[in-house]
Each structure stands twice: as structure tokens, then as C-alpha cells.
Image (cartoon, rainbow, N blue to C red):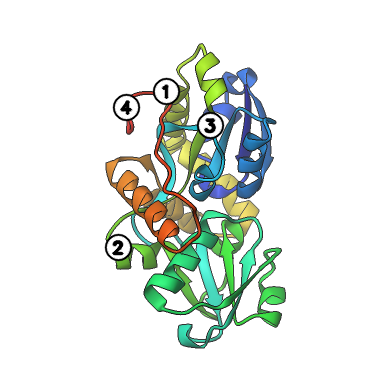
Amino acid sequence: MRISTISYLNTAPLMWDFEHGDMGKGFEISYTVPSQCARELEQGKVDIGIIPSFAYAMVPDLMILPGVAIAATRAVRSILLVSREPIEAITAVALDSSSLTSVALLRILFQKYWHRVPQFNSMAPDLETMLAEHDAALLIGDPALQVDRTTYTTWDLAEEWIRFTGKPFVFAFWAVTRAAAQRATIDLAAIFQQSRDHGLQPQNLTAITETWSRKLGMSKVDVLEYLTANIHHYLDAACLEGLRLFYRYAHECNLLTSIPELHFAETRPALI
């Protein structure tokens, strides 16, 4: 089966078994940006993808692999609105072109909570270029982690969502095409949950921290804290409540034409 995934720090624990053992031999793995994972599923180029939660509402015939997510129950650090201005002075925002869910979340926050409707423009995630032409910039993933937050005013979008709603926020999860799920002869949910569990074992987190601290120029302490405190890797009941609320708000803000139903690749919606 073909997997489309992303090479971000927050997915490193999820990919552990596929990148450090025999499990990867049974799958064809490609790496891209979050928004492209969804396109590849829609185009039939892959069978399974780690997709932005917003994309699930836009791509037909997908099923969620239960139990695994890129989510946040507190500040996430890797989804930032960055500016030199206060929120009330922001009239134009540059959007990281690799993002779908974070863009929708930002629009919801502006409309429902900050009561502003700035102009939005998609750009490549280069902060200085973005701020040269806009009042603020949305950065996601590793580029956001590398922002010097002492230099700018920043808003952590997960933290803002949780402050306003009291719910966790789900940024991404594994989805499989309905056709692939129906023809699968293996327990996909168990395989992906087990890979997550192995990736979060202390000795494996140490290895991930060593690798990614060098890649990102971050301290090992910061990398480990991000993976263990800022990212929640479980699609549990509270996260499903937050996900459903996100879809409802996206519909109310005219970002979605309808509220999607959640279809799972097995009958248990949250196996952790």
C-alpha cells in the first residue's frame, strides 16, 4: 500500500516503525507537505495519508484510521501567527501555502473571536518576505518552531482555540481511501497505533530528539518538550469533540459547504 506523509518533527514518532524496521518494506512511502497529502489521496496516487483535518471534509470517500493524530491540548508552538503589530492593527495576512487546517483555524479565530476580516494571501513560508508585504504571517510546522518569538508578537493558534472553546484541536490524522480500507488484509489501525506507541518509547524519543535537534538547530530539551508536552498523538474522545466543533465552526464561517460525518476504518472511533 502507498503512504503519503510529511517530514516534520511532529510526525517522527508516528513513522517510527516504517522508518526503523521491517514495517516500511510492506509500504511504499513518499514525503510531501500536508496539503499535498490530501491531493494525492484524492487523485488516487496513494492509499493512506497523514492529512490536514480540514482536508478530510473536502476529499470524498476517506476513512479515518482511529486513535492516532497530530493534536494539541495546550500551546502547540508549531502553528503561529507572527506579527510586529497588535491583533487590532492586522489588515493583511500572508498564509503558509503548505497549510490547509491552520488557514481555516486562523480564519475562524479572526471571524468568531477577534472579530476582524483581514485580507489573506498564500505565500511560501519565508517569514521576512511574508512580513515585508503583510502585517502578519501564518507559519506552520518546523519553520514556526524556528521563529525567535522574542522579536515578534505571536499567537499560538492551538492555545487561542483552546482558550476560546475549551476543546483540544486536531491538526491532522491518518486517513485511508475507502477502497483501500475495504481491500486491506491487515489491521491498519493497529499497525499505525503501534508505530506511534513505539515512536513515543523513551529510548526512541531520545533518538528522534538527537536527529531533529541537529536538523532544526534546536536544543534537545526543546525538541523533547515539544514532542511530549506540546503535541498530543492520540485521537481520543476529547479530540473528536474538538474536531467536530472545528467542522461546525468552519461551516458557520462559510469555509465548508456542509459538516462532514466522521467515518472510521473500524467500528471503534478511538482506540488508544
Question: Can residue 272 be seen at all in this image of the molecule?
Answer: no
Disc 2 target residue: 165
Disc 4 target residue: 268
For image coordinates 44% across by 72% down, the residue present is 111
Question: x and y percent of residue 126 in the render?
Answer: 69, 68
Q: What type is the residue that disc 4 sits on?
A: Arg
Comes first in the chain, label 1 or label 4: 1
Which-is-in-front pick, marks 2 and 3? Answer: 3
What is the distance, in whole Å, between disc 1 and disc 3 at their CAs? 21 Å
Give left or right: position of 178 versus 215. left
Q: Which mark is residue 190?
A: 1
Label 2 CA crowd tier, 10 Å (few <14, some 14–19, many 20+): few
Q: What type is the residue that disc 2 sits on?
A: Thr
Q: What type is the residue that disc 1 sits on?
A: Ala
Question: x and y percent of residue 228 in the render?
Answer: 39, 49
Q: Quadrant of residue 251?
A: bottom left
Element carrying mark 2: helix
What is the distance, in whole Å, between disc 3 and disc 4 at their CAs? 18 Å
| Quadrant placement of the C terminus | top left
